[in-house]
Image: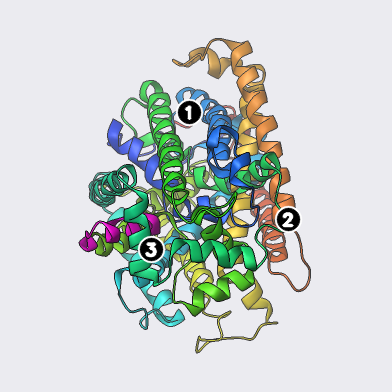
Amino acid sequence: MTEKKVFVRKATGLVREIGFITAVLIVVCNMVGLGWQKRLFQFTGPRIVPENEYVMGLPPVVMSFILVGIVVLFTVWVLAILGASMPRSGGGYVYISRILHPAIGYVASWLEYFSIAVSYGLIGTAVFEGIMIYAWMAGWGVNWATPEFLLLGGMAIVALFAIIACFGVRMTGLLLHVIFWVPAIITIVLYGLLLTATPDSLNAGIQNITGVTSSTFTDTALSLGMATAPADYWSAVAYASLGTFWAYIGFGAATFVAGEIKEAAKDLPKQLFTANVFVILLYITISFLVARAAMMVGQVGNYSFFSSYSWLSYGSSEGQAYLSSISVGKAWMPNIAGFIASGMGQTWILALIPIFAALWVANDIPPFILTSSRIIFAMAFDRVLPEKLAEVNERWHTPIYAVIVTMLVAFIGNFAESNIFASSASSLYLGSGNVVAKFLNDSGGVAATDIWDALFFFLCAVAGMIFVFRRKDIYERSSFKAGGPMVVTLIGTIATVANIWFLWQIVQGWPWDFPDGGAWTAWVATLIIIILSLLVYYYYRTKGKRVGVDYSTIYAEIPPE
């Protein structure tokens, strides 16, 4: 009788080389990138609330960071429970496929794979965009920043990091430490500026850099209609939650490389909570300090420079035109620190701001290449993708083919973020109505990855909710019981409800807008991935059964070490 086949090998070939701090940084760097630097202003501008109505003096975005941070911790708790119980590379793919259903886990993980891999490319290009955003403040030119340069430069960064990842998690981890600690030190400098800010220093800096006073910003915003339709505080908090949730995405990054973390069954929960609490505190404190500083100046009635700069940047096309007319960039968190530094005479700090932005973006990339490549590695190890993707280099202990494929997928993100087909400034511009340009553009790429992330973590939460009922055998072997079966179920239920709410916010926030808007393409891309992934899944299941692969055994077990 022919022996039934199960996993590709009796051992994965991966080695547990990731230490505690590196695992924490994988999560932190995945979460903290470019978007958090503008969230405060980006989601304040479209929903202006009179500042005297702020609850406890907190702007709606800061309140949202607090509330959403608490909700995120419940999802993190679910991932900690599942990760400690099934500490294997692939993360949510393993959890969902073993608890809910293999096909559901497969489809969900393809969505998450494309979310991370495409973001890998988006971020490769965004490294240069981070420099562009603050170049006006540092006095640097941006004539080099053509769509062609952004595409090729981004692809070069993607390829460079892929090559480094081929040399294993130890080498990638060393690089991660370097590109984390440099911007972290600059962040401490920015904290110092925000803590020591005075109305005089901020007013002087705004005048020095923009050529106008802080009150001029507020007067202009009011004259253009900023106060004509004030928003309700709590509705503004709900609106901001869409943006603050995305700032937290990446909270479970370490689970995807759990098969390479030292003592993951014991340490993974600590690493997840350490990283997430750090990031939550970072977002809350720096957003509060930035708002506090900006509200010191430009007061006119119930509004200040904080509200006016936010509204001019993100709440009105007329406001954006005004900023362009005076050659001032949109509101981002480091801008406020730059104004303060200039007002204090510390103009040398202005040159650090583009470096701060570029490196906080760049340190996203090592976690992206590690986490996404391990998803398809785990699928291949279960024999539902080409087995070549499960091959591990004996010297470097890394799935090189999975890394290379992920690099190629990441190039999609480079094409999208560079707007090479969607920008009239590009030599490859295809026109405003071209279907390729509608799919491959910077806004469509962000919308799609947001949707895929939310669907994946919703299913992880559902898996956590029914974990102790569906896979009691796995739970009982876990070293992290989290208070017992009822507590685990309660945590999973809260996380599931929270993720349903987030999904609803996405549906409202990213409408179809067919045919003129570009957001509908994200939903079409989602449907295409779901259909194609199901076809691929059933192809490999059918092919495997013909050669004796026992999938019922594979999905009943945790993959081997």
Name the residue carrying label 3.
206
Q: Residue at x 59, y 40 (%)?
A: 548
- The disc placed on residue 83 is 1
Q: Earlier in the sequence, mark 1 or mark 2?
A: 1
Per the model, the C-alpha gap separating discs 2 and 3 is 27 Å
Residue 1 lies in quadrant: top right
Q: Which residues are magenta?
A: 334-348
Residue type at numbered disc 2: Ala
Residue type at numbered disc 1: Gly
Label 1 sits on a secondary structure element that is helix
Name the residue carrying label 2.
229
Farthest residue in the bottom direction?
427
Per the model, the C-alpha gap separating discs 1 and 2 is 47 Å
Residue 474 seen: yes
Farthest residue in the front direction?
301
| Neighbourhood count class around disc 2 (C-alpha, 10 Å): few under 14, some 14–19, many 20 upward | few
Residue type at numbered disc 3: Ile
Question: Is 335 inside the magenta-drawn segment?
Answer: yes
| Neighbourhood count class around disc 3 (C-alpha, 10 Å): few under 14, some 14–19, many 20 upward | many
